[in-house]
Amino acid sequence: MGICHTCTRRKTSGTVRNLVTGAVSTAPDEDVQICVSVPVGDVDLAL
């Protein structure tokens, strides 16, 4: 669902797609919600 933001992690590289909005992001060093985001290829996360 993506409403509590407790799963938010820093994506350091790669592309992700948000399953709720359909938005695709390639920006480095951004926060993503790993419960609603799927990788599009290789992705590095700071866990």
Image (cartoon, helix red, strand yellow):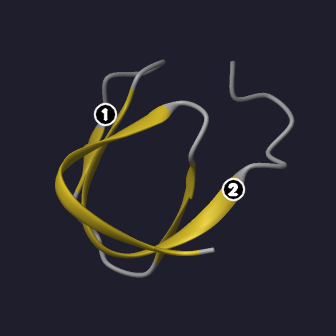
Residue 2 is drawn in which quadrant? top right
Distance between the alpha carbons at the discs numbered 1 and 2: 16 Å
Q: Residue at x 56, y 45 (%)?
A: 34
Query: Which corner quadrant holds the C terminus?
Result: bottom right
**Residue type pointed to by label 2:** Thr
In the shown orientation, is residue 18 left or right of residue 42? Answer: right
In the shown orientation, is residue 44 left or right of residue 20? Answer: left
Q: Residue at x 79, y 45 (%)?
A: 5
Compared to residue 42, the image places residue 39 above or below, namely above
In the shown orientation, is residue 34 left or right of residue 45? Answer: right
| Mark 2 lies on residue | 8
In the shown orientation, is residue 30 left or right of residue 26? Answer: right
| Mark 1 lies on residue | 23
Q: Residue 20, percent across and down?
A: 48, 18
Residue 27 is drawn in which quadrant? bottom left
Compared to residue 21, the image places residue 41 above or below, namely below
